[in-house]
Image (cartoon, rainbow, N blue to C red):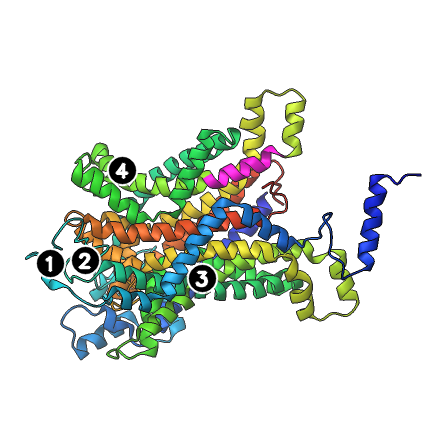
Amino acid sequence: MSLSPVEGVALAEIESGGDAGAPREKGVVGRSPGQLAWLRLRRDRTAMISGGMLVFFVLVALAAPLIEALYGIGPRDQFQSKLDGFGMPLGYAGGVSGDHFFGLEPGLGRDIFIRLVYGLRTSLLIAFAAAVISAALGIVLGALAGYLGGWLDAVINWITDLTLAMPFLIIALALTPTLTLRFYGERDAVSPAFGVAVLIGVFAIFGWTSTARLVRGQVIALREREFVEAARASGAGLGHMLFRQLLPNIWAPILVSFSLAVPQFITSEAALSFIGVGLTEETPSFGRMIYQSLDYLQTDPAFVFFPGITIFALVFAFNLFGDALRDALDPKSSR
Amino acid sequence: MARFLIKRIFSAVLTLLAVSVLTFLMFFALPRDPVTGMCPKNCNPERLERVRQELGLSDPLITQYAGYMKGIFTGRDLGSAQGGQCDAPCLGWSYVNNEAVLDTIARVLPVTLSIVIPAAILWLLLGVGLGMVSALRRGTWLDRAAIGFSLTGASLQLYFVGAVLLLVLVYNLRLLPVPSYTSIFDDPVKWASGLVLAWLALAFLFSAIYARLSRAQMLETLSEDFVRTARAKGLPKPQVYGRHALRAAITPVVTIAGLDVGAALGGTVITETTFGIQGLGRTAVEAVRAGDLPTIMATVLIAAVFVVVANVLVDLLYAAIDPRVRLG
């Protein structure tokens, strides 16, 4: 009586299962959904390239003071001697040279490269902080609304509708100086950190509703499932139900929405600085640079070009990575 | 249907009321003294006090709010310094512009409408068309080109695209005049040539997002059973894709489009700033800078009305497009 190959495999499985210490030979390897997603992500070239770009941007932002030391120029240093009589940078392409990689700002003559490095730092700090806070708020409120339903659900839904109806840019534009005035007097110097904090707060107030809507929908879909009922029947409390039973099942869409929220906050911050609110003049910011550069569109196009391309590259990398993450986390995806 | 409509309109009105209360609180109650921001040049204490009296700023907030709302629905008398009798819908008097807010709005609203409506038609046709074609031709060079286009467009910023367009088309090649607004009734050609850059910039960025969305929706719909059934019973491809699949795939696109168009009508702040066109958005920004409370209040309310009305329209469109939706 010969064993069929199938039985052999089955036996091997049983034998190895009994002996935990024995190394598993090739065969079926159990992988968690997280490991599967990671594998898919590793195999995706776009994800790896865009992920690499993101790591690079984050490192540049973190290492900004180090880069300043190596580069030898600070974000507030002015090089008036390298400007001509009209305040335009000497040389080609806005004064690009070995000393000034991206040239100089017309007028003040500050170095564009180092200002972009610090602008990246501001931008990423605001975007990440706003995304984390609004995700946390959205997860808790969305899960509560979805799980408990009733009046809480109605109220949260209504607030979501309300925030959608408010013109974000105008409200943010109006709220930022008002809030600043509340904390600082008319003539007190406003610290740059406070401006950043106010922006993060305004973004979080407006940003949490989309996560809340997403989480609410997912929780409602899970609410009546057996495992939830079982947990409820065994007397689990609200916190346990939300954080131990429901949330572990929906972290994938949350992660995707988080990764796509960060570039949105980056662009919102730039847009706000573009219309001239939020950050004070000392804080380097992409949007503010572009806004200032528009005056020089005809005379010094390079000044428009460098900040514009940097924001594009940053947002592009985030969007690509978010898409790849979505594909990797989707069990239906074929990749 | 009628019941749904009444319920929907009721909740829309409630949302608008809440927006008005919130805006009112935000702008009238939060600043320590709203008058300092809106006093005309050469302010002195007496003048400040007079403005405060005229605006009724010493009254309790509820009285002020009630007065404002009364003005919108029935009109009210603002006093001689503010243009006297103000008929409904009265949005107040702007000290900064020295005119009734309603007149300012009547001047700038057509500008924003002229920017947004043609741009929206362009971006919807281009975006949805591109998305559909690339979904049907999945994997071909056309599809890849469309994906590349939409990924690039979705990451570009309007002020950057606008700047590049301005530089190339206006300043270097001199193909187009410097953007400006002329009324369509005065000179349609000048109207179009002055705004075409804004349309192009908006359409480029938005169509990228719509191409991406409608491609994903179409691909999902094409794998549904009802599409297979329709094909299996012998319906020709154009009919299956054009009627059955398109209808199902386009529903989420309509939702997003309603929100986007509604929000854009409330003021395309960035577009107007980039091209230097004085529309609703730029007026709002300037009002905020100048602390011109009545104008801020009016622009925020109008923006909210657009979004809320667009949402109601989207819900109604749903029932028309998607046979699975029954309004009850």
Q: Which residue is mark 3?
A: A206
> Quick one: SS at disc 2?
loop
Are both tags, 2 and 3, on one chain? yes
Amino acid marked by disc 2 = Leu
Asked whether residue B214 is drawn in magenta, I would say yes
Dominant SS type (magenta): helix
Residue A83: image tag: 1
Q: Which residues are magenta?
A: B212-223
Q: Which residue is mark 2?
A: A104
A50 over A71 or under it: above or below:
above
Are both tags, 2 and 4, on one chain? no
Q: Residues within 10 Å of mark 2 (few under 14, many from 20)?
A: many
The residue lying furthest to the right in this view is A1
> Quick one: SS at disc 4?
helix
A40 over A116 or under it: above or below:
above
Query: Residue at (46%, 45%) from the top-left corner?
Result: B258
Asked whether residue B128 is drawn in magenta, I would say no
Query: Residue at (25%, 35%) from the top-left corner?
Result: B192
B148 over A154 or under it: above or below:
above
Task: Say which quarter of the image contains residue B85.
Answer: bottom left
Q: Nearer the viewer, residue B204 or A175?
A: B204
Q: For the residues carrying marks 1 and 4, which lies nearer the camera in this image?
A: 1
Please report whichever mark, 1 or 2, sits nearer to the chain's N-terminal start: 1
Label 3 vs label 1: CA separation? 43 Å
Give the image location of residue B67, x and y in percent.
Answer: 36, 66
